[in-house]
Amino acid sequence: MTPQNGVYTQMSVFARIFQNIVTYQYSWIGILVLGAAGLFALAVLFPETVLGRVAGRIIPVRRIGLVQ
């Protein structure tokens, strides 16, 4: 819980992690890491969707053996 102008608001864990990464001095590295993690998640978890197929072409998860 963090007070803002006398009002308490609760931040979720993901919002706090995202805030820490984006406001870090080298935030472009954090954005690249988040982007790569998103592409990897799309390629592995949703390989049958259009975005999953595009991510699978960028990150070859079939060659690694993570997706059949």
Image: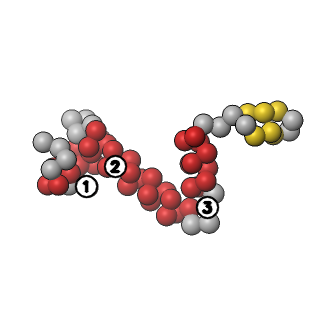
Quadrant of the drawing holding the C terminus: top left
The colour scheme of the drawn protein is secondary structure
- The residue lying at 34 percent from left, 49 percent from top is 39
**Secondary structure under the numbered disc 2 in the rendered image:** helix
Give the residue type at disc 3: Tyr
Residue 24 placement (x, y as % from top left): 61, 61
- What's the distance in space between the residues labelled 1 and 2, CA to CA? 8 Å
Q: Report crowding for label 1: few under 14, some 14 to 19, many 20 or more residues within 10 A (C-alpha).
A: some
| Label located before the other in sequence (3 or 2) | 3
Q: Report crowding for label 3: few under 14, some 14 to 19, many 20 or more residues within 10 A (C-alpha).
A: few
| Label located before the other in sequence (1 or 2) | 2
3 or 1: mark nearer the eye: 3
Give the residue type at disc 2: Leu
Give the residue type at disc 1: Ile
- What's the distance in space between the residues labelled 3 and 2, CA to CA? 22 Å
Identify the residue under disc 2.
39
Task: Tell me whether the residue at label 1 lies in contact with that at label 2, contact meaning CB atoms closer than 8 angstroms.
Answer: yes
Q: Is residue 9 above or below residue 59?
A: above
**Secondary structure under the numbered disc 3 in the rendered image:** loop
3 or 2: mark nearer the eye: 3
How many marks do you count on the picture?
3
Residue 59: image tag: 1
Residue 10 placement (x, y as % from top left): 69, 34
- The residue lying at 28 percent from left, 38 percent from top is 45
- The residue lying at 23 percent from left, 43 percent from top is 53
